[in-house]
Image: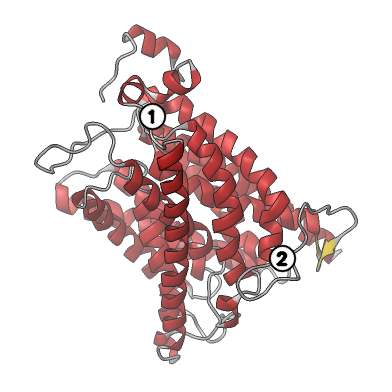
């Protein structure tokens, strides 16, 4: 009976995480301009399809293949789960759950391409990221690799999923350079507003709900109901992140900025992803509050550095992912630390904190360097960015031949602010 319940729970969790792609569609399309909305939605489905086939062919095997070593897994390529079980969970269900995580990391990476990346670049980078970047880091931490041997704590993927995707996004936005009109000659930045805050808010809510599959699903079993505790901590951090970001933005600018609040909620979710099973509720609130605060200043920092991050992937998933991973080195308790050791505030000294920092640095550098190398070669061969004319027209029309909002765009003469 327990095996059947685990299978049902894991399948439900996988569905919740896959449905987070719908949240990203609304979040990213709402955060960008109307002339690119159809493109944002379409490429999400397109790239998740590519991710599915590549993860089936090689991604799973490079993470969990039994003939690998501390650096890389090897074996179980093109897996056929019929009749096979992974512990108490059917192999097919385990595959779907892990595929959903790989798909989220890839979607995060696309934040660096927003409103100026070629569709062909999405195709090629989807294949290479899913085959050469994500599986290596996932193996290091979740597949029995060298970081797991050191006791690296990352329960549901603040590093594996979020930081990995964010570092790929950083490589992309550096090579693509800012969108037309984002920065003036004197270095000052112009606001390029998304076209639909309602879509953005609904997207965040869908992601918030999907996160219960992300975090609580990572218990991998029904067991004694511990997944409920993980979900509880997840909710506390998300709420704390939203409120902290809103209050900071309100205090600094005098306006209760909605996009900042939404990014605060996401930052809280990203941060608690690593630690949700290792910390107490009060620590979850603290982790969420700090994530909500740092995301506000991180967004400003990247803008001052003239790094154009339309979806704020670098701040929400990168900086908050770093904080969330490091936070277990402070807050992990001796009774909850099923992986690694207790944190600094519980008498564990600096040992676990050091492991967490080492994991962040090595994983982040690997994701950035490999992604940058792949994208640099692509830039010098097929090119990464659409032409200036195509960018001004919008990717809906230039890449797909039709607008996501055909009536509105035609009524406006097909023009929209650059």
Residue at horizontal 53 percent and vertical 48 percent from the top: 106
Residue 171 visible? The answer is: yes
Left or right, residue 236 beside residue 418: right
| Residue closer to the observer: 81 or 154 | 81
Q: Position of residue 256 (x, y in %)?
A: 23, 45
SS state under label 2? loop
Residue 284 visible? The answer is: no
Q: How many marks?
A: 2
Q: Position of residue 266 (x, y in %)?
A: 42, 52
Q: Which residue is mark 2?
A: 74
SS state under label 1? loop
| Residue closer to the observer: 284 or 47 | 47
Residue 374 in the image: above or below residue 330 = above
Q: Which residue is mark 1?
A: 386
Q: Quadrant of the C terminus?
A: top left
Residue 54 in the image: above or below residue 354 = above
Left or right, residue 134 beside residue 85: left
Neighbourhood count class around disc 2 (C-alpha, 10 Å): few under 14, some 14–19, many 20 upward = some
Outermost residue toward the right in this view: 83
Neighbourhood count class around disc 1 (C-alpha, 10 Å): few under 14, some 14–19, many 20 upward = many
| Residue closer to the observer: 262 or 99 | 99
Between disc 1 and disc 2, whose residue precedes?
Answer: 2
Q: Position of residue 150 (x, y in %)?
A: 55, 83
Dots 1, 2 in contact, CB < 8 A: no
Color scheme of the displayed model: secondary structure
- The answer for how far apart the CA atoms under marks 1 and 2 are is 37 Å
- Disc ID at residue 364: none
């Amino acid at each position: 009976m327990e095996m059947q319940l685990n299978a049902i729970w894991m399948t439900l969790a996988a569905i919740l995480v896959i449905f987070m792609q719908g949240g990203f569609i609304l979040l990213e399309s709402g955060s960008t301009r109307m002339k690119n909305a159809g493109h944002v939605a379409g490429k999400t489905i397109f790239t998740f399809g590519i991710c599915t086939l590549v993860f089936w062919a090689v991604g799973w095997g490079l993470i969990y293949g039994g003939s690998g070593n501390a650096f890389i897994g090897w074996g179980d390529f093109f897996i056929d789960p019929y009749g096979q079980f992974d512990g108490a969970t059917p192999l097919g269900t385990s595959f779907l759950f892990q595929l959903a995580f790989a798909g989220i990391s890839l979607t995060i990476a696309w934040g660096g391409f927003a409103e100026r990346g070629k569709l062909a670049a999405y195709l090629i980078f989807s294949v290479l990221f899913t085959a050469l970047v994500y599986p290596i880091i996932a193996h290091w931490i979740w597949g029995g690799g060298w970081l797991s041997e050191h006791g690296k704590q990352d329960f549901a993927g603040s590093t594996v999923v979020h930081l990995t995707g964010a570092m790929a996004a950083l490589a992309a936005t550096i090579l693509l350079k800012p969108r037309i009109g984002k920065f003036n000659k004197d270095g000052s930045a112009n606001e390029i507003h998304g076209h639909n805050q309602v879509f953005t808010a609904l997207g965040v809510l869908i992601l918030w709900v999907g996160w219960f599959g992300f975090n609580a699903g990572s218990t991998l079993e029904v067991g004694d109901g511990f997944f409920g505790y993980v979900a509880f901590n997840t909710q506390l951090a998300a709420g704390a992140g939203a409120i902290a970001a809103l209050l900071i933005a309100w205090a600094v600018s005098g306006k209760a900025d909605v996009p900042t609040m939404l990014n605060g909620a996401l930052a809280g979710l990203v941060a608690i992803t690593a630690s949700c099973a290792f910390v107490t509720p009060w620590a979850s609130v603290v982790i969420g509050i700090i994530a909500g605060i740092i995301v506000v200043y991180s967004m400003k920092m990247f803008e001052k550095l003239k790094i154009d991050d339309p979806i704020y992937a670098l701040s929400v998933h990168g900086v908050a992912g770093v904080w969330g991973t490091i936070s277990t080195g402070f807050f992990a308790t001796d009774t909850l630390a099923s992986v690694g050791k207790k944190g600094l505030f519980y008498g564990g000294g600096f040992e676990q904190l050091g492991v967490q920092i080492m994991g962040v640095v090595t994983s982040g550098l690997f994701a950035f360097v490999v992604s940058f190398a792949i994208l640099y070669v692509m830039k010098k061969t097929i090119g990464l960015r659409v032409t200036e004319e195509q960018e001004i027209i919008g990717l809906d029309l230039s890449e797909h031949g039709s607008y996501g909002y055909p009536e509105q765009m035609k009524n406006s003469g097909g023009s929209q602010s650059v």
